[in-house]
Image: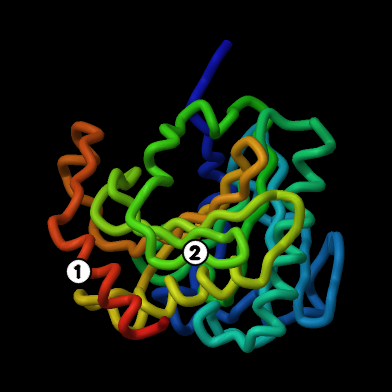
Amino acid sequence: MKTNHLHFNTSIGVLKPESIRNKQQACPFCDRDQLKELIEVDGPIILLKNKYPVLENTYQTVLIETDDCHAEISTYDVSHLHKLLRFAIRHWLEMERTENYQSVILFKNHGPLSGGTIAHPHMQIIGLNDINYEENLEHEVFQGISIEEKEGVKFTLSTKPKVGFYEFNVEMDDSGYVEVFGEYLQTAVHYILHNFPFKASSYNLFFYHIGRKIVAKVVPRFITTPLYIGYGIPQTPNNLAWMVNDIKSKYF
């Protein structure tokens, strides 16, 4: 039977540690000697099976980005940034190529409004047995006002955002990682956390493999608008052009 819903195992969910709000919680990713079921280790970067696989009919992995619990994409030096993104994208696409799943998702949560539970910088790569995420996408959500384009990589601000308000897109061909891609991602995250017109402490980073393109969407997170929760109606702000010019003036 066709489904668009993932089933969440609550008996596993209640066991998960929470260190974003609970600062007394010991970080499970800092105690590296206790990590189990490692898939690949590359210096401070570790890919392992998720100890708490709360999503049924999936294969869940966690990608620990660094051994610095207080670091974050906007603070990484460029060499680590590129190493991390090459590592993450390679494993994501390799899992796709197994054809064991309807689709494979790669994403990151950061901050108290992101939906995550562990503060330590990490991403997740999840193989979905029953759901093809692309069926839920309208490609117009990746279109937007150009911020900059270089070396075949496009950096835009969505004019028809998926959830609403401000969503940044970075797009490149899937033929190989281009360092400008990572630099644009870092710029978007830095802008959200440090130069956004509204105080922002949280964001999500989502990756999509569509046709021959890899697209990353960086979404600042606030309390989700009730119009989207109740009716699925996204809102587009009237100051997109101003924001594009603000980013250009600060970063380019």
Residue 53, how many percent across, how many down? 65, 48
Point 52% across, 69% down: residue: 185
Q: Secondary structure at mark 2?
A: strand
Name the foreground residue: 58 vs 237. 237
Hey, which quadrant is residue 123 in on the image?
bottom right
Residue 212, how many percent across, how many down? 67, 41
**108, above or below 196, in the image:** above
Point 34% across, 64% down: residue: 220
Hey, which quadrant is residue 128 in on the image?
top right
Hey, which quadrant is residue 61 in on the image?
bottom right
Q: Give the label on residue 131, or none.
A: none
Q: Which residue is mark 2?
A: 149
Name the foreground residue: 6 vs 177. 177
Point 43% across, 71% down: residue: 188
Q: Secondary structure at mark 1?
A: helix
Residue 129, how many percent across, how many down? 68, 29
* Quadrant of the image containing the C terminus: bottom left
Question: Given the image, on which type of amino acid does mark 2 rest?
Answer: Glu
| Left or right for 186, reference 230 | right
* Quadrant of the image containing the N terminus: top right
Q: Nearer the viewer, mark 1 or mark 2?
A: 2
User: Between marks 1 and 2, how big is the CA–CA gap?
Assistant: 18 Å
Question: Given the image, on which type of amino acid does mark 1 rest?
Answer: Trp
**224, above or below 200, in the image:** above
Point 20% across, 76% down: residue: 197
**26, above or below 37, in the image:** below
Q: Give the label on residue 242, or none.
A: 1
Pick whichever of labels 1 and 2 is earlier in the sequence: 2
- Do labels 1 and 2 touch, CB within 8 Å? no
Residue 87, how many percent across, how many down? 76, 65
